[in-house]
Amino acid sequence: MQRAFITLLLMVFLACGPARAEDRNPGREFGLAGASVGANLLYTPPKLLTALIGLPVGALTGVFTGLDLRSMYAVWVPTVTGTYFVTPAHLEGTRPIEFFGSHYPTTLGCEANPNMACTHDAGSTKALQPAP
């Protein structure tokens, strides 16, 4: 068991170096694929556990805040979204690994309250104003 773990760890370290497009070869691809399988054995269970805990916690947050969608999304987005499986692209560094997600919908307030004038400027920190 310890020998398999050390072999897997060595594969991850050898496969994680950055590579240019012309440096690709079948051996490297095989190493990245094997390393991603090994990384998923360690990464995916905690990510799934985080999501399974975040779903009911977000629902309870909604219940205790009067079904406030923003507070539910404040729990759900970090815990449920993000990267679930590590791919060779993640190990090469061409795609980021996000354990806690950060993709918030920009139109959340508009559907929840049609009487609000919504601006979809991601850089805006101003509070929403009632529609005239």
Image (cartoon, rainbow, N blue to C red):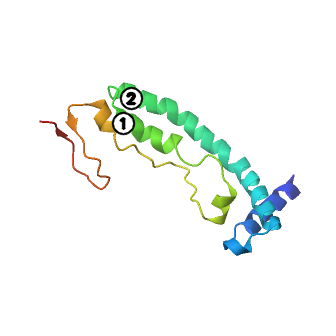
* Amino acid type, callout 1: Ser
Q: Secondary structure at mark 1?
A: helix
Kind of residue at badge 2: Gly
Q: Nearer the viewer, residue 21 or 38?
A: 21
Q: Which mark is residue 62?
A: 2
Question: In this orientation, does residue 110 appear?
Answer: yes
In this rendering, position of residue 108 left or right of residue 75: left
Q: Residue at x 77, y 63 (%)?
A: 29
Count of numbered labels shown in the rendering? 2
Could you say where residue 98 lies in the image, as x and y percent from the top left? 55, 53
Q: Residues within 10 Å of mark 1 (few under 14, many from 20)?
A: some
Q: Return the x and y of residue 15 as percentages of the image width and height.
A: 74, 66
The residue at 67%/61% (across/down) is 91
Residue 81: % across, % down: 52, 43
Q: Position of residue 94 (x, y in %)?
A: 60, 64
Q: Residue 50's quadrant in the figure?
A: top right
Residue 19 visible in the shown view: no
Q: Residues within 10 Å of mark 2 (few under 14, many from 20)?
A: some
Q: Is residue 97 above or below residue 16?
A: above
Q: Secondary structure at mark 2?
A: helix
Residue that extends furthest to the left in the rendered view of this protein: 132
Q: Residues at badges 1 and 2 in contact (C-beta under 8 Å)?
A: yes
- Circle 1 residue: 71
Residue nearest the observer in this picture, 96 or 3:
96
The quadrant of the rendering that contains the C terminus is top left
Residue drawn 33% across the image and 29% down it: 65
Residue 89 bears which disc, if any? none
Residue pictured at 40% horizontal, 41% vertical = 74
Q: Is residue 34 left or right of residue 79?
A: right
* Cα distance in 3D space between marks 1 and 2: 7 Å
